[in-house]
């Protein structure tokens, strides 16, 4: 009996010990599982960190590459848009239909030239300059005819117009008689207004580039309006006598690239404008071009008015240096020019300087 009791007790102890070991083993496994779960959760939180306030470290190299690519794309896009602006440059790629050139005579040509003449006088810069100018020569005659309602864009050399004795008409002052600058009505004005080539005969004009070959609808439809600074104007406004402002219309048929005025045409305009200022200041009032420099800044679109301003830089003996700028009527710079003019030797001994000066002034 006693042996049986001892055996039973041993079995109970063994069973209790086994259960204890089993529970402990299960506790260790549970602890390990908990640790593994905690470790996994921590790793997951480290990866996502949705609510963390600490910024997640990023690779700086990738960000720099992306920023460089973005800036490059912005730069290329800006360059492409900039190269296509202003809008007139788009017209070179998508050209509108080219209008037919008008004949040199006929009702359409006359209407075209009258339209440009009226538009010329309606420009704000013309209205402003005419208030401080005196019209002389053929320009004065044309102003009188315009005040009478006559639309004439050319004067025959034999045309005579009676200028009002008081020397004024609506919209302009006109010179009555005498040289335009020295001792004449221009002594009381800042500018003399002239119209070159108005009275050129057909025989004389047919072999002259600017007075004949380039004249007509679609080209130089009407003679330019030239405002030349007088001695009084130079004293009141600065600059020199002979500095000028010239307003001219360049038509659709003077192009190099379609729609853009030929650079050689602009060089011709600049040469003649600069020469006028030089001749005012050379001793014999005559000079030839020794050097002409032009810096083209922007394309000059055809079929528009241009404003060319000239200024004497230097005059020494038989040499005069003149500079100028060409702009559109909005003030946008199109080109800059500079020229040197030299008076031929002994010209002052064979030519009448006063007569040449008066001829220059129309």
Image (cartoon, grey):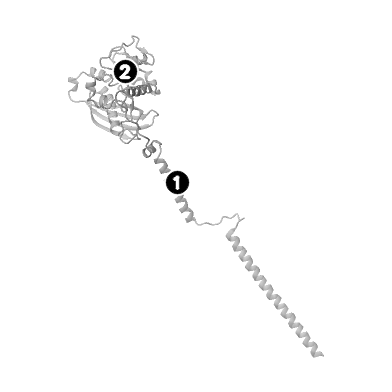
Contact between labelled residues 1 and 2, with CB atoms less than 8 Å apart? no
Tell me the SS state at disc 1: helix
Mark positioned earlier in the residue sequence (2 or 1): 1
Q: Which residue is mark 1?
A: 74
Residue pictured at 59% horizontal, 60% vertical: 46
Give above or below for 334 relative to 352: below
Residue 57 image offset from top left, x and y in percent: 54, 57
Tell me the SS state at disc 2: helix
Nearer-the-camera pick, 189 or 71: 71
Q: Foreground mark, 2 or 1? A: 2
Residue 96 image offset from top left, x and y in percent: 38, 35
Give above or below for 180 relative to 306: above
Residue 18 image offset from top left, x and y in percent: 72, 80
Outermost residue, right direction?
Answer: 1
Image mark for residue 107: none
Nearer-the-camera pick, 166 or 187: 166
Residue 188 in view of the camera: no
Nearer-the-camera pick, 293 or 328: 328
Residue 330 image offset from top left, x and y in percent: 40, 29
Mark 2 and mark 1: Cα distance apart in space: 56 Å
Locate the C terminus and report the quarter of the image it occupies: top left
Outermost residue, top direction?
Answer: 165
Q: Is residue 212 left or right of residue 171?
A: left
Q: Which residue is mark 2?
A: 139
Res. 180 image quadrant: top left
Res. 231 image quadrant: top left
How many numbered circles are shown? 2
The local crowd at label 2, few if under 14, some if 14 to 19, many if 20 or more residues have their Cα within 10 Å, is many
The local crowd at label 1, few if under 14, some if 14 to 19, many if 20 or more residues have their Cα within 10 Å, is few
Residue 63 in view of the camera: yes
């Amino acid at each position: 009996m006693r042996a049986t009791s001892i055996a039973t007790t041993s079995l109970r102890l063994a069973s209790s010990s086994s259960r204890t070991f089993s529970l402990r083993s299960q506790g260790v496994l549970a602890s390990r599982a908990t640790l593994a779960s905690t470790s996994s959760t921590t790793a997951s939180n480290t990866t996502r960190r949705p609510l963390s306030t600490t910024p997640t470290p990023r690779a700086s190299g990738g960000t720099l590459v992306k920023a460089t690519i973005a800036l490059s794309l912005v730069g290329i896009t800006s360059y492409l848009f900039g190269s296509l602006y202003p809008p007139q440059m788009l017209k070179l790629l998508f050209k509108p239909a080219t209008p037919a050139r008008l004949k040199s005579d006929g009702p359409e040509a006359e209407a075209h030239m009258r339209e440009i003449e009226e538009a010329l006088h309606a420009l704000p810069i013309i209205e402003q300059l005419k208030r401080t100018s005196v019209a002389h020569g053929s320009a004065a005659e044309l102003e009188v005819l315009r005040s009478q309602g006559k639309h004439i864009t050319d004067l025959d050399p034999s045309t005579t117009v009676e200028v009002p004795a008081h020397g004024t008409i609506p919209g302009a002052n006109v010179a009555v008689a005498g040289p335009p600058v020295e001792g004449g009505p221009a002594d009381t004005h800042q500018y003399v207004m002239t119209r070159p080539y108005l009275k050129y005969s057909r025989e004389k004009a047919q072999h002259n580039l600017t007075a004949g070959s380039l004249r007509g609808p679609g080209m130089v439809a009407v003679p330019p309006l030239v405002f030349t600074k007088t001695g009084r104007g130079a004293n009141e406004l600065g600059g020199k006598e002979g500095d000028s402002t010239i307003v001219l219309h360049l038509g659709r048929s003077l192009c190099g690239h379609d729609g853009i005025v030929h650079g050689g045409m602009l060089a011709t305009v600049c040469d003649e404008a600069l020469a006028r200022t030089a001749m005012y200041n050379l001793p014999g009032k005559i000079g030839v071009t020794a050097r002409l420099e032009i810096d083209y800044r922007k394309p000059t679109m055809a079929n528009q008015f241009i404003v060319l301003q000239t200024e004497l830089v230097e005059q020494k003996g038989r040499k005069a240096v003149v500079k100028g700028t060409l702009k559109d009527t909005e003030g946008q710079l199109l080109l800059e020019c500079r020229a040197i003019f030299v008076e031929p030797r002994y010209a002052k001994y064979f030519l009448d300087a006063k007569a040449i000066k008066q001829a220059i002034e129309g």
